[in-house]
Amino acid sequence: MATKTAIKNTSASASKRLDVKKTYKIYIDGKFPRTESGRFYALKDAAGNVIANVCRGSRKDLRDAVVSNRKAQNDWSKRSAYNKAQILYRIAETLEGRKAQFIDTMMKEGYKESNAKAEVEAAIDLLVYYAGWSDKYIQVFSTVNPVESSHFNFSYPEPTGIVNVICPQNQALLGIVSHAAPVIIGGNTCTLVVAEKHPLTAVEFAEVIHASDLPGGVINIITGYRKEFIAHASSHMDVNAIICSDVDQEQRKTIQINAALNVKRVVDYSKEETASPYRIMSCQEIKTTWHPIGI
């Protein structure tokens, strides 16, 4: 009799228990640490129900991410075009296999199923597109320059280096892929400050790149409130470029003023086609080499 009563009480308690919400971590240097600040924010659905806890990244997290970018950049920039394309294609393969999972996650974040499916498929196609450009953009944008002296004169693109990216708020997955893929296929490394409305998709994408052959530190992903990162991301002195999309006039002004401190390149991807080799070139420097003739 006592046993039946205990089972009944346990069943009643279970019906009243609170769900244990998952806490989504950030992604730095090929690892999933918690934010050093210990802060998080509750992500809610359209009905106001909490669906997950999300790390609220800090300035220290951003500094750690840039350090890992710098550590990874030299090796990554020296990888062959073929190897970089293989890795990007592998990310596309993995994303294809987890398509249903991403659609489900994006629906939790407020997407309609049809829109989520279309965006996931567009992101996969875009990864394949940029993988295809890996061994072609240098051929297209390199030149042999005419000079009057007895020299050959060559100009060709090289990676800018470390890039901070302020991702758009209105695209959960495509906003990440369309910003990260052209940056890394050009031999750069980057840290993404992702949309605070869609952090679950971003962290699940981090799981995809973690399972690929992409070296740690090539892409870092930080969740949190973008207004807390605008100044830090644009003023960091070891960052060579900053990409922003979907920022207001005041935020753009802050970025441009801070970027002038160490002559960062400021790029607005919202003005360019999502699939375009010019996105790759926006984070490239043109190097010119002179070679004498007849000596």
Image (tube, rainbow, N blue to C red):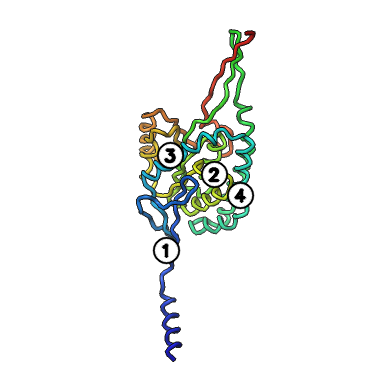
Judge from the rendering whether residue 228 lies leftward or rightward of residue 265; answer left or right.
Answer: left
Q: Amino acid at mark 1?
A: Asn
The residue to which callout 4 is attached is 121
Tell me the distance, in whole angstroms, between the alpha carbons under discs 1 and 4.
28 Å
The residue to which callout 1 is attached is 49
Looking at the image, which is closer to me, 168 or 136?
136
Tell me the distance, in whole angstroms, between the alpha carbons under discs 4 and 3.
33 Å
**Dot 2: within a 10 Å radius of its alpha carbon, few (fewer than 14), some, or many (20 or more) residues?**
many
The residue to which callout 3 is attached is 67
Which of label 3 and label 1 is nearer to you? 3
Tell me the distance, in whole angstroms, between the alpha carbons under discs 3 and 2.
22 Å
SS under mark 3: helix
Q: Quadrant of the C terminus?
A: top right
**Which sits earlier in the primary sequence, circle 3 or circle 2?**
3
Which of label 4 and label 2 is nearer to you? 2
**Dot 4: within a 10 Å radius of its alpha carbon, few (fewer than 14), some, or many (20 or more) residues?**
some
Tell me the distance, in whole angstroms, between the alpha carbons under discs 3 and 1.
37 Å
Q: Residue at x 55, y 55 (%)?
A: 102
Q: Amino acid at mark 4?
A: Glu
Which of label 3 and label 2 is nearer to you? 3
Q: What mark, if any, has residue 177 been given in the picture?
A: 2
Judge from the rendering whether residue 256 lies leftward or rightward of residue 183; answer left or right.
Answer: left
Q: Amino acid at mark 2?
A: Val
Q: Residue at x 42, y 89 (%)?
A: 2
